[in-house]
């Protein structure tokens, strides 16, 4: 059997993590299957090399990303499946052709396809609004023709079923494992120097890129309340924004400048810097509105970092009673949760309970890969 692994849209951090972690393991788990992995050129994948049953194809994309995406969906993926003589296509990122002449499996990573929320959609630029309107339209027409769809949590499976009326027996839940850089021992890891420089007793790590659904826009109102409650001298929130990536992040940083007494930007953290940030933090602070999985929650548990996060279905499923929850749209609710955390600290026996919670998830990417291979064989 020959399988086309469609990773042409693997541009975001989440997609990169999954592909770089799971694809080599999938190839190892199925030596009798030949895989053709298609990746975008000039996106940092040049270090990938073909192996005995994994062929790497780096494809040049048009300068205009939108035009390139349409070319992928309507022309290239079908053409690649013919050129490689593929028996099956596994799309590692939400959208593929509406119709393929071979079985098509799609990994749904984008939560905005099943969550509809005006609280963050109102912040979208017109091009972003148009993009997601089209994406949802396309997914709705593609999904019924797929042999299978994979998601990472039962919460996403339920929402996918309800939103698009996809039969539950066509939806497979395959959770992710910890990234490799966090599975390694923590010996010799030093706390982030910039975070440790503050003398405040509560250092909150807001580890998230600048996207509308991450809810950074709640921070000014939150800081105002922290000031009113005399908590500004106790709390420092560390964000990880990169002004060179999107104009949205530049606007966010400009908005946050008057609140530097409570908000510090660390910039985008490299993978080898993440553990140091967790080690310096008193808690992970994530007021996100939407997530498809929430790998960051697993990271915090593995790093023994308590969690303050949104009272939403995805967070409840991931964290259960390990986290302290708040209404992410109510700055007073967030401030109250922070105040209670300062007074009471993390949940009792957090370390032991976090280890137990982690045992519910795959212990390695090899285990994740075996689940994907089983789905491929079923659909074949």
Image (cartoon, helix red, strand yellow):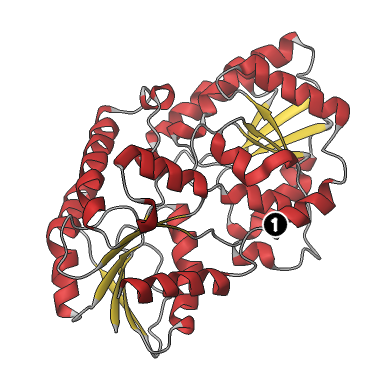
Which residue is at 83% across, 27% downward? 342
Q: Is residue 40 something one can see in this rendering?
A: no
Which residue is at 19% across, 59% downward? 72
In this rendering, position of residue 7 left or right of residue 155 = left
Q: Secondary structure at mark 1?
A: helix
Which residue is at 42% across, 40% downward? 159
Q: Position of residue 90 (x, y in %)?
A: 32, 67
Q: Position of residue 308 (x, y in %)?
A: 69, 34
In this rendering, position of residue 313 left or right of residue 235 = left
Q: Quadrant of the C terminus?
A: bottom left
In this rendering, position of residue 241 left or right of residue 309 = left
Q: Position of residue 293 (x, y in %)?
A: 52, 48
| Above or below, comparing residue 284 to residue 4 in the picture | above
Residue under pointer 1: 358
> Quadrant of residue 149 in the image?
bottom left
| Above or below, comparing residue 29 to residue 119 in the picture | below
Task: From the viewer's side, name the closer residue of 251 and 159.
Answer: 159
Q: Position of residue 40 (x, y in %)?
A: 30, 64
Q: What is the number of callouts on the image?
A: 1
In this rendering, position of residue 158 left or right of residue 225 = left
> Quadrant of residue 227 in the image?
top right
> Quadrant of residue 178 in the image?
bottom right
Which residue is at 15% across, 79% downward? 83
Q: Count neighbours of disc 1 (C-alpha within 10 A) and say few if under 14, some if 14 to 19, many if 20 or more.
A: some
Residue located farthest toward the top when viewing the structure as drawn: 228
Task: From the viewer's side, name the closer residue of 217 and 146.
Answer: 146
Q: Is residue 9 something one can see in this rendering?
A: yes
| Above or below, comparing residue 331 to residue 163 in the picture | above
Q: Quadrant of the N terminus?
A: bottom left
| Above or below, comparing residue 186 to residue 239 in the picture | below
């Amino acid at each position: 059997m020959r399988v086309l692994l469609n990773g042409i849209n693997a541009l975001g951090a989440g997609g990169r993590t999954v592909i770089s972690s799971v694809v080599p393991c999938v190839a190892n788990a199925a030596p009798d299957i030949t895989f053709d992995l298609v990746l975008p050129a000039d996106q940092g994948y040049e270090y990938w090399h073909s192996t005995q049953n994994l062929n790497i194809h780096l494809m040049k994309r048009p300068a205009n990303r939108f035009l390139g995406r349409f070319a992928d969906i309507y022309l290239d993926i079908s053409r690649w499946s013919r050129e490689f003589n593929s028996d099956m296509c596994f799309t590692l990122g939400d959208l593929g052709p509406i119709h393929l002449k071979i079985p098509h499996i799609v990994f749904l990573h984008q939560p905005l396809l099943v969550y509809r929320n005006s609280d963050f959609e109102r912040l979208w630029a017109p091009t972003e609004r148009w993009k997601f309107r089209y994406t949802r339209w396309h997914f709705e027409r593609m999904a019924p023709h797929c042999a299978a769809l994979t998601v990472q949590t039962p919460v996403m499976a339920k929402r996918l079923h309800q939103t698009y009326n996809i039969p539950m027996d066509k939806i497979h839940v395959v959770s992710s494992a910890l990234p490799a850089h966090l599975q390694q021992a923590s010996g010799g890891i030093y706390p982030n120097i910039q975070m440790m420089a503050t003398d405040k007793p509560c250092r909150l790590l807001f580890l998230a890129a600048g996207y509308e659904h991450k809810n950074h826009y709640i921070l000014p109102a939150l800081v105002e309340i922290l000031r009113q409650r005399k908590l500004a001298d106790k709390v420092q929130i560390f964000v990880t924004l990169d002004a060179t990536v999107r104009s949205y992040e530049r606007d966010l940083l400009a908005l946050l400048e008057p609140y530097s007494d409570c908000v510090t930007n660390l910039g985008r953290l490299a993978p080898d810097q993440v553990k140091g940030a967790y080690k310096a933090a008193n808690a992970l602070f994530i007021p996100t509105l939407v997530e498809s999985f929430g790998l960051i929650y697993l990271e915090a548990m593995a790093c023994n970092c308590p969690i303050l996060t949104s009272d939403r279905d995805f967070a409840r499923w991931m964290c259960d009673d390990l986290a302290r929850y708040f209404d992410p749209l109510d700055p007073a609710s967030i401030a109250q949760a922070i105040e209670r955390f300062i007074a009471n600290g993390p949940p009792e026996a957090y370390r032991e309970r976090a280890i137990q919670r982690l045992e519910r998830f795959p212990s390695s990417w090899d285990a994740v890969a075996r689940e994907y291979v089983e789905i491929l064989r079923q659909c074949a």
